[in-house]
Image (cartoon, helix red, strand yellow):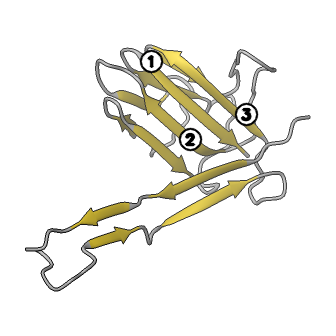
């Protein structure tokens, strides 16, 4: 059985340079603001443990079944009995937003019972769910994706 080690980093670093008019008495007119952020690492020893992962570059609107995640290399991933822990979405479309929602049939809620995760044109989204979502099962297993074009998705389950 494979082992998983996943690290998700949340950080924003801003470098702001002011003019002499804005900061006349200062020799250094540059402020770096990078004081916030966090890193989450999940592996076999963490709580929750990371036990399965899946990533794909996909095209167009579709339903993603978390119990049947095919990949180009390696076995199909079945996340039954596990919770989605980490999610990374990248909207590669040149035509509009990426909308990921609870599946219409046997839906899996990642943002409330009727909520959507909407990633704007050219945008990215990453989420850490901190073991708060439901287990994937036969009645809670699908995500509906609406997009015109390509997107990338990566998920870690535990």
Q: Could you tell me residue 115's position as x and y percent?
A: 39, 40
Tell me if residue 7 can be seen.
yes
Residue at left offset 38%, top offset 29%: 99
Q: In this view, does 3 lie to the left or right of 135?
A: right
**How many angstroms separate mark 3 from mark 1 (CA)?**
24 Å
| Residues packed near mark 1 inside 10 Å, few (<14), some (14 to 19) or many (20 plus) | some
Residue at mark 3: 79
| Residues packed near mark 3 inside 10 Å, few (<14), some (14 to 19) or many (20 plus) | many
**How many angstroms separate mark 1 from mark 2 (CA)?**
17 Å
Q: For mark 3, give the secondary structure.
A: loop
Q: For mark 2, give the secondary structure.
A: strand
Q: Is residue 75 above or below residue 109?
A: above
Q: In this view, does 150 lie to the left or right of 74?
A: left
Front position among marks 1 and 2 = 1
Q: For mark 1, give the secondary structure.
A: strand
Residue at mark 1: 150
Q: Which of marks 3 and 1 is nearer the N terminus?
A: 3
Q: Which of marks 1 and 2 is nearer the N terminus?
A: 2
Q: Which of marks 3 and 2 is nearer the N terminus?
A: 3
Q: In this view, does 37 lie above or below 145?
A: below
Q: Could you tell me residue 36's position as x and y percent?
A: 45, 69
Task: Depth check: give the residue in front, 145 or 106.
Answer: 145
Task: Depth check: give the residue in front, 52 or 73.
Answer: 73
Q: Could you tell me residue 69's position as x and y percent?
A: 68, 22
Residue at left offset 24%, top offset 80%: 27
Q: Find residue 138 and report its image quarter.
A: top right
Q: In this view, does 137 lie above or below 19?
A: above
Residue at the far right in the pictured view: 1
Residue at left offset 76%, top offset 47%: 5
Tell me if residue 113 can be seen.
no
Residue at mark 2: 87
């Amino acid at each position: 059985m494979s082992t998983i080690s996943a690290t998700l980093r949340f950080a924003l670093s801003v470098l702001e340079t002011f003019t002499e008019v804005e900061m006349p008495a200062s020799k250094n007119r540059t402020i770096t603001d990078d004081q916030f952020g966090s890193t989450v690492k999940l592996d076999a020893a963490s709580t929750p443990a990371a036990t399965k992962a899946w990533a794909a570059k996909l095209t167009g609107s579709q339903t993603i079944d978390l119990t049947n995640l095919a990949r180009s290399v390696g076995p199909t991933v079945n996340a039954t009995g596990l919770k989605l822990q980490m999610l990374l979405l990248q909207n590669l479309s040149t035509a509009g937003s990426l909308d990921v929602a609870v599946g219409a049939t046997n839906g899996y809620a990642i943002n409330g019972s009727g909520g959507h995760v909407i990633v704007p044109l050219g945008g990215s989204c990453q989420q850490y769910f901190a073991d708060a979502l439901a287990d994937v099962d036969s009645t809670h297993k699908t995500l509906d994706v609406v997009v015109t074009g390509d997107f990338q998705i990566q998920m870690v389950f535990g």
